[in-house]
């Protein structure tokens, strides 16, 4: 008996067809299945949607690898790797990638590779999309004396928080007769900014909620936070 084995599924076989067993050659079994083209979205803020979720990656290569893994169908326990070439100047967003699956099947080490293209496409991520659309969940109403000074403090606090949590963005600032309104992307950073102002200034605060439609089927409440600075401080 011959001791040949199929390099794709690891089965022993008497006969190889183009180097594969009958089953693998017929195309019914594949160690690695992956589309010829994969799209990877990136945003101007630096986030990349590698694994169907927006996040920051150390390198674009790490994002491409994630995209290859999430798009590949393979045997259980196979290890996927991605080798990619530097894109051409002419087509900087088209990256040639060799995806490889390595596994131990039927006691044999097997491997399969496929050359594909990863296309990078620019798109606003969820956070940037919301910010551009003017979305907000909190309004800080600064009232009373020194409101410009308090505004500066609130804005710089939100900027610091923005580094770790982009929902801390300020969607707009409205100067009114009665004071200044600051529209903030999310409630928690807005509350934190108010806590900071409380430590420095003698302020009175009051919170109120209002239902503001739905987001992904869930009700969204908007919080208005009144920040009144007392005179003489
Ligand atoms: Zn086979
Ligand atoms: Zn973004």
Image: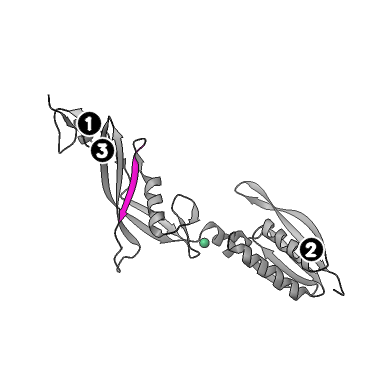
Quadrant of residue 209 in the image? bottom right
Q: Position of residue 160 (x, y in %)?
A: 62, 66
Q: Disc 1, disc 2: CB below 8 Å?
A: no
Residue at 51%, 59% in the rendered image: 125
Q: Report the residue marked by disc 3.
A: 110
Q: Is mark 1 within 8 Å of ligand 1?
A: yes
Of residues 69 and 123, the one nearer the viewer is: 69
Question: N-terminal of the two: label 2 or label 3?
Answer: 3
**Between tags 1 and 3, which lies in front?**
3
Quadrant of residue 192 in the image? bottom right
Say whether residue 169 is visible.
no
**Magenta stretch: helix, strand or loop mostly:** strand
Q: Position of residue 22 (x, y in %)?
A: 19, 31
Q: Report the residue marked by disc 2.
A: 226
Q: Label 2 to label 3, Cα distance in Å?
A: 65 Å
Element marked by disc 1: helix
Q: Label 1 to label 3, Cα distance in Å?
A: 15 Å
Q: Label 1 to label 2, Cα distance in Å?
A: 71 Å
Say whether residue 100 is visible.
yes
Q: As drawn, which residue projects farthest toward the top? A: 1
Q: Disc 2, disc 3: CB below 8 Å?
A: no
Question: N-terminal of the two: label 1 or label 2?
Answer: 1
**Between tags 2 and 3, which lies in front?**
3
Q: Residues within 10 Å of mark 3 (few under 14, many from 20)?
A: many
Q: Report the residue marked by disc 1.
A: 23
Element marked by disc 3: strand
Of residues 201 and 113, the one nearer the viewer is: 201
Residue 58 drawn in magenta: no
Apparent side of residue 163 relative to residue 141 in the rendered image (left or right): left
Question: N-terminal of the two: label 1 or label 3?
Answer: 1
Q: Is residue 59 above or below residue 90?
A: above
């Amino acid at each position: 008996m011959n001791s040949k084995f199929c390099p794709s599924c690891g089965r022993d076989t008497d006969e190889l067809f183009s180097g594969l067993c009958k089953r693998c050659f017929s195309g019914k079994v594949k160690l690695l299945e992956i589309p010829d083209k994969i799209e990877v979205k990136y945003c101007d803020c630096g986030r990349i949607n590698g694994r169907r979720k927006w996040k920051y990656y150390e390198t674009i290569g790490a994002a491409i690898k994630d995209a290859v893994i999430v798009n590949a169908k393979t045997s259980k326990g196979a290890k996927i790797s991605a080798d990619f070439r530097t894109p051409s100047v002419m087509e900087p967003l088209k990256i040639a990638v060799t995806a490889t699956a390595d596994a131990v099947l039927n006691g044999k080490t097997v491997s399969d590779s496929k050359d594909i293209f990863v296309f990078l496409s620019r798109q606003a991520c969820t956070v940037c999309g919301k910010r551009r659309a003017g979305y907000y969940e909190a309004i800080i109403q600064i009232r009373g004396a020194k409101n410009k000074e308090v505004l500066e403090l609130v804005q710089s606090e939100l900027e610091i928080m923005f580094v770790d949590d982009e929902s801390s963005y300020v969607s707009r600032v409205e100067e009114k007769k009665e004071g200044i309104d600051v529209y903030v992307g999310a409630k928690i950073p807005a509350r934190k900014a108010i806590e900071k102002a409380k430590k420095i200034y003698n302020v009175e605060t009051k919170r109120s909620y209002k239902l503001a439609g739905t987001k992904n089927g869930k009700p969204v409440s908007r919080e208005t936070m009144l920040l009144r600075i007392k005179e003489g401080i």
